[in-house]
Image: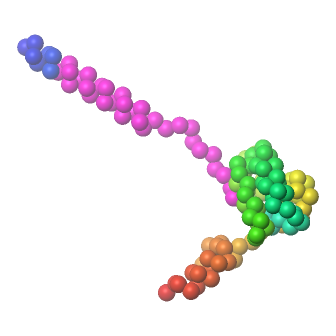
C-alpha cells in the first residue's frame, strides 16, 4: 500500500513539474505590432558621412524602427509603425533632416509583385 502511494505521488509530482515547465515554454507575450516598409529616392546628398548621418537621424524619429540608405542607388528604405507615423509624413521629415529632395520610390512590377529591376531581369531570364 505504501509503495502505491509513493509511486502515485512521484508520478503526480513529475507530471505537475513537466506541466509547469511545458506551460513556461509556451507562454506568449503581447502581440507584435505591425510595421510598414516604404522606400524613397533621396537626391542632393554629397558625402557618405551625410548618408550615415541622415540614416541615423531618421532612425531617431518617433515611430521609425529602422532606416537604411544605399549610397549607390540613393534609395532610403524605412520601416515604421503606422499607428505612430504615416508614410506621407516621412518625405518632409527626411528632406528637412538631410537638406535634400525626397520622392517615393516605385519598383517595377512583375505579376503584381514589386521587385527590384535586377531581380525582374533575372526572373525574365531564368523563368520558364
Residue 43 percent across, percent down from the top left: 86, 67
Relative depth, front residue between 93 and 30? 93
Look at 73% across and 54% down and name the residue there.
67
Look at 77% across and 65% down and name the residue there.
71
Residue 54 percent across, percent down from the top left: 82, 54
Q: Quadrant of residue 8?
A: top left
Whether residue 15 sits left or right of residue 120 in the image: it is: left
Residue 109 visible: no
Above or below, 92 relative to 20: below
Whether residue 89 sits left or right of residue 17 in the image: it is: right
Q: Residue furthest top?
A: 2
* Magenta-colored stretch includes residue 71: no
Look at 14% across and 16% down and name the residue there.
5
Q: Main secondary structure of the magenta part?
A: helix
Whether residue 25 sits left or right of residue 117 in the image: it is: left
Relative depth, front residue between 127 and 72? 72
Q: Quadrant of residue 9?
A: top left
Q: How many marks?
A: 0
Residue 102 percent across, percent down from the top left: 85, 64
Relative depth, front residue between 104 and 46? 46
Magenta highlight range: 8-37
Amino acid at each position: 500500500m505504501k509503495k502505491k502511494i509513493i509511486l502515485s505521488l512521484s508520478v503526480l509530482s513529475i507530471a505537475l513539474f513537466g506541466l509547469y515547465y511545458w506551460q513556461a515554454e509556451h507562454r506568449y507575450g503581447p502581440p507584435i505590432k505591425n510595421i510598414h516598409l516604404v522606400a524613397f529616392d533621396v537626391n542632393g546628398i554629397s558625402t557618405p558621412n551625410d548618408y550615415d548621418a541622415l540614416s541615423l537621424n531618421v532612425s531617431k524619429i518617433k515611430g521609425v524602427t529602422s532606416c537604411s540608405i544605399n549610397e549607390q542607388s540613393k534609395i532610403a528604405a524605412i520601416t515604421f509603425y503606422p499607428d505612430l507615423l504615416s508614410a506621407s509624413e516621412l518625405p518632409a521629415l527626411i528632406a528637412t533632416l538631410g537638406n535634400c529632395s525626397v520622392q517615393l520610390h516605385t519598383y517595377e512590377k512583375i505579376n503584381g509583385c514589386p521587385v527590384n529591376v535586377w531581380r525582374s531581369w533575372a526572373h525574365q531570364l531564368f523563368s520558364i
